[in-house]
């Protein structure tokens, strides 16, 4: 199993960082190879520049400005996002990562003479996980339409393998959270990760090392 974790939060000691660490621990216990993209720590630029926009369809050169991220996306079979929900959606940096990295001939194939619609390009991804927090209530988030969840679980999800495993967990009312609510949410994340990773093949070399 090859897992790519895309993490987006500006504070290294946040509750979201604790969720990230739990996700990484679960992946390690499952024997996964892991790559972590910490967008804030890397100083990732979310801006799709005019030159990138102009060369958006010029494959494969369109991937050159974000070659490391594209390579990680092509490498993984498990894709996990960990981030805070701001204004019901994705932080600008994470949305910009999608804009710049999920490119034509990387995440999807553009229409051509034989195909009138966009076709999926991430069929190698068989597991998709989304773990987030938000200040609004569950009811208000769903009344608004949960755009962040929809973008990742539906938008990105439709580009992945059709029978992929999925996992989602969100701590609502984060601004009034308690130690108990946070502990309960971490337990929920743990259960969702176990569900996501169920049946994942362990690396025989790692198993031998632990024997």
Image (cartoon, helix red, strand yellow):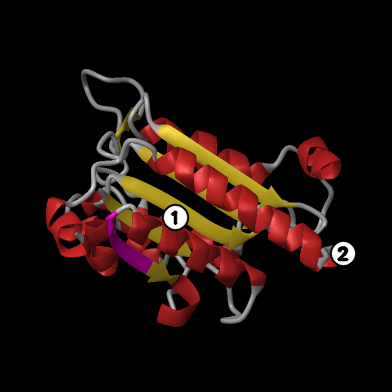
Q: CA distance from mark 2 to mark 1?
A: 32 Å
Residue lying at 78% horizontally and 58% vertically, measured from the top left: 181
Residue extending furthest front? 211
Q: Earlier in the sequence, mark 2 or mark 1?
A: 1
Res 5 → quadrant: bottom left
Which class describes the residues within 10 Å of circle 1: few (<14), some (14-19), or many (20+)? Answer: some
Which class describes the residues within 10 Å of circle 2: few (<14), some (14-19), or many (20+)? Answer: few
Residue 122 at what x, y percent from top left? 30, 39
Residue 25 lies left or right of residue 52; in this view the side is: right
Magenta range is 31-36
Residue named by callout 1: 99
Magenta span: predominant SS is strand
Residue 59 lies left or right of residue 146; in this view the side is: left
Residue 56 at what x, y percent from top left? 32, 53
Residue named by callout 2: 176
Residue 205 at what x, y percent from top left? 12, 57
Picture layout, residue 177 above or below residue 172: below
Q: Nearer the viewer, residue 106 or 80?
A: 80
Residue 136 lies left or right of residue 42; in this view the side is: right
């Amino acid at each position: 199993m090859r897992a790519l974790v895309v993490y987006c939060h500006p504070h290294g000691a946040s509750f979201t960082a604790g969720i990230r660490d739990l996700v990484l621990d679960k992946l390690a216990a499952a024997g996964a190879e892991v790559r972590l993209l910490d967008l804030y720590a890397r100083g990732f630029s979310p801006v799709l520049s005019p030159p990138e926009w102009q060369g958006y369809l010029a494959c494969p050169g369109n991937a050159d400005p974000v070659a490391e991220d594209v390579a990680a996306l092509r490498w993984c079979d498990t894709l996990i996002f960990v981030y805070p929900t701001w204004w019901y959606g994705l932080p600008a940096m994470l949305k910009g990562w999608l804009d710049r990295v999920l490119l034509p001939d990387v995440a999807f194939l553009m229409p051509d003479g034989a195909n009138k619609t966009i076709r999926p390009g991430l069929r190698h991804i068989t597991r998709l996980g989304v773990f987030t927090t938000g200040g609004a209530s569950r009811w208000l988030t769903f009344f608004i339409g949960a755009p962040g969840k929809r973008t990742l679980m539906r938008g990105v999800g439709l580009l992945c393998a059709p029978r992929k495993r999925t996992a989602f967990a969100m701590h609502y009312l984060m601004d009034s959270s308690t130690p108990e609510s946070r502990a309960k949410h971490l337990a929920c994340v743990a259960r969702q990760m176990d569900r996501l990773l169920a049946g994942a093949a362990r690396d025989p070399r790692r198993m031998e090392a632990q024997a």
